Structures are given as structure tokens and as C-alpha cells.
Amino acid sequence: EVRLVESGGGLVQAGGSLKLSCAVSGVTFDDYSIGWFRQAPGKEREGVSCIRNSDAITYYANSVKDRFTISSDVAKNTVYLQINNLKPEDTAVYYCAASGSSFFRPVRGLQPNEYDSWGQGTQVTVSS
């Protein structure tokens, strides 16, 4: 059973950087794809990036591609989301999600329905 634990959020000033972590356990890491999502109060959950661990293929939302970088460390069973030049509109709870589908397509990986399991989220707050 896949377990996901996000960490790395916090309160930062606009223009700063954060590196979020998604620790994956309970499954074979390379068999899974991981997505990062965020949700601000009163707004729908928004997919920002995903990675297919079998081949490290990534995908990004157009709105964050210039500032966000997703990466995977197989040795640590962890997926990271590096966020640079943080903006107040980045304020949200950030979630990671896992898909064990053999047919996972990164171009579809920003859709919440593509995932089976979710972490508890980590809060990112950016002050203006």
C-alpha cells in the first residue's frame, strides 16, 4: 500500500525558494508516477507537475514551468518539487499523489483523477 508524506513547506518571502519533498513508501518506487498539486482556500485542486519514475519523464503546468522543477531520487524513494521565485499566488497546500498505472501518461498527469493515493499536504505561504 503506497504511503506519501509531504514536507518542506513553510512561510517565505516573495522571491524566495522552497524545495518540497514527497516521501514514498510501501511500493516499488519505479512502478509509480508522482504528481504535485496545490489547493488554495476556496479554489479547486490544481495540478502543477508530475514525473513518471520508470523513465523520469516530466510534465508541467504552463503557469509554473518557468519556476518549478520536479525531480526524483530513486535511492531515497523521494520526489521533489523545487519552487523558485515564489509569488503570493503560490500560497496553497501542496499535495503529492501517486499512480501505479502501467498506462500513466505524463501529459495527463495534472488531472487529479489519474491518481490513486494522496499525501496529507504541506502548507506553503508566501508573504508579499
Image (tube, rainbow, N blue to C red):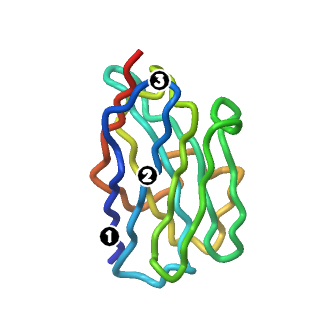
* Image depth: mark 1 or mark 2 in front: 2
Which of pointers 3 and 2 lies earlier in the amino acid sequence?
Answer: 3
Between 24 and 32, the residue placed more toward the observer is 24
The numbered mark at residue 93 is none
**To which quarter of the image does residue 5 belong?**
bottom left
Graded by Cα atoms within 10 Å as few (under 14), some (14 to 19) or many (20 or more), the crowding at tag 2 reads many
Query: CA–CA distance between discs 1 and 2?
Result: 16 Å
* Residue located 44% across and 38% down the image: 38
Residue 31 higher or lower than 66, as above or below: below
* Residue located 47% across and 23% down the image: 14
Dot 3: element: loop
Which of pointers 1 and 2 lies earlier in the amino acid sequence?
Answer: 1
- Reading the image, the residue beneath label 2 is 20
Question: Residue 77 location, x and y as percent?
Answer: 46, 76
- Reading the image, the residue beneath label 1 is 3
Kind of residue indicated by mark 1: Arg
Q: Is residue 63 left or right of residue 121?
A: right
Residue 32 higher or lower than 71, as above or below: below
Dot 2: element: strand
